[in-house]
Image: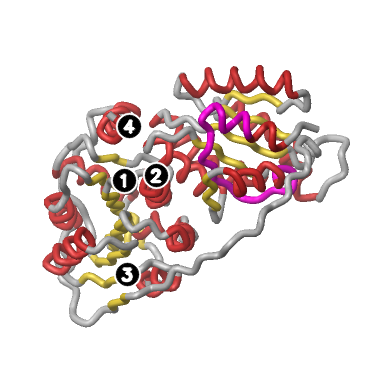
Amino acid sequence: MISTKRFGDKLKSLGFDFFSGVPCSFLKNLINYAINECDYVAATNEGEAVAIAAGAYLAGKKPVVLMQNSGLTNAVSPLVSLNYPFRLPILGFVSLRGEAGIPDEPQHELMGCITTGMLDLMEIKWEYLSADFEQVEKQLVRAQTCLENNQSFFFVVKKNTFEKEALKEQTQTSNLNTLKIEKTIEDQLPKRIDAIRMINSLKDDQTVQLATTGKTGRELYEVEDAVNNLYMVGSMGCVSSIGLGLSLKRKDKNIVVIEGDGALLMRLGSLATNGYYAPKNLLHILLDNNTHDSTGGQITFSHNVNFVDIAAACGYSKSIYIHNLSELEAQINNWKREKSLTFLYMKISKGSKEDLGRPKMKPHEVKERLKVFLNG
């Protein structure tokens, strides 16, 4: 075993003081240390934790993600379609439940066999974390080198690697909705590009705009390619989690997330995480056309979901139904004046701009440009 405190202190000395993750019995002592001594953001699932860490990386942090190996399967999408193309490196710790020869629950049997193979397939460098601290220090040097080359690095953690670390008493916060506005009139149903054009017109030099994958990001690029924009590719449903990680660590910036209904439905639990941490500088806008527009127009289930109610129940300070572009403009300006975690919901028409282009920059070039804007 290694001393959890000594190991955690070493991580902190190397600049790793932002953690996100999901509990695991093998990692509980390291998680306890992170909660006790560092900045720890609990996630509802492992993919969300990876996206939160990606946002923190954009903000200039060196993030760590903690997860059970069963949760590695949940994190595959952002690891291969967010972190890889955007070159957003994270330091990961994944437990080895189901290790051969060690009794464990039946659901871990197969995962124990394929954990390291999955990391290999995702082209993520990894090592088994040593129980010898001298070796651990050398491992951390290798991990640092990998991260400095914009590649993620994972430690695979076996049972009983970390010594006991007691969890200090935690305080729970409850963020209550203070304003909820439901639908009262008919919807204007503007085109998505017109809604994006309105959102973009209200940004200033302290605003960062994150647009979800598919035609939302492509239309933002069409409206204006700007250094403070991030056009998501892949990692569907992760955009508000990136926004959360970024907004928590860069309170000096206004973070605007432009979401689609299909994407949000895919990771609806992110609303609970956002509502709990409730950064005032985060504006979450959902443009709902009841359609997977980028993949042929198949319907989503959004017509059966009251997103305004859900966001309010999850702790968004304000959750507002937007009927038209004038209301959209007014509520964005209200948020800029009176900051609080805000969810704006607007129905839009189906379809998109004809001959819609794609960003000409590669994802990692968009990321580097944004990092310069944020940290230059």
Q: Relative to 311, does residue 238 appear above or below in the rendering? A: above
> Residue 368: x percent and y percent?
31, 28
User: How far is the residue under mark 3 from the one under mark 2?
Assistant: 21 Å
User: How far is the residue under mark 4 from the one under mark 3?
Assistant: 30 Å
Between label 1 and label 4, give the one nearer the viewer: 4
> Residue 259: x percent and y percent?
32, 55
Q: Mark 4 highlights which residue?
A: 367
Q: Which mark is residue 249?
A: 2
Of callouts 3 and 2, which one flags the residue occurring earlier in the amino acid sequence?
2
Between label 1 and label 3, give the one nearer the viewer: 3
Q: Per the image, is 25 magenta?
A: yes
Q: Which mark is residue 63?
A: none
Of callouts 1 and 3, which one flags the residue occurring earlier in the amino acid sequence?
1
Residue at 67% across, 54% down = 168
Of callouts 4 and 3, which one flags the residue occurring earlier in the amino acid sequence?
3
> Residue 54: x percent and y percent?
44, 39
User: How far is the residue under mark 1 from the one under mark 4?
Assistant: 17 Å
Q: Relative to 70, does residue 61 appear above or below in the rendering? A: above
User: How far is the residue under mark 1 from the one under mark 2?
Assistant: 27 Å
Q: Mark 1 highlights which residue?
A: 214
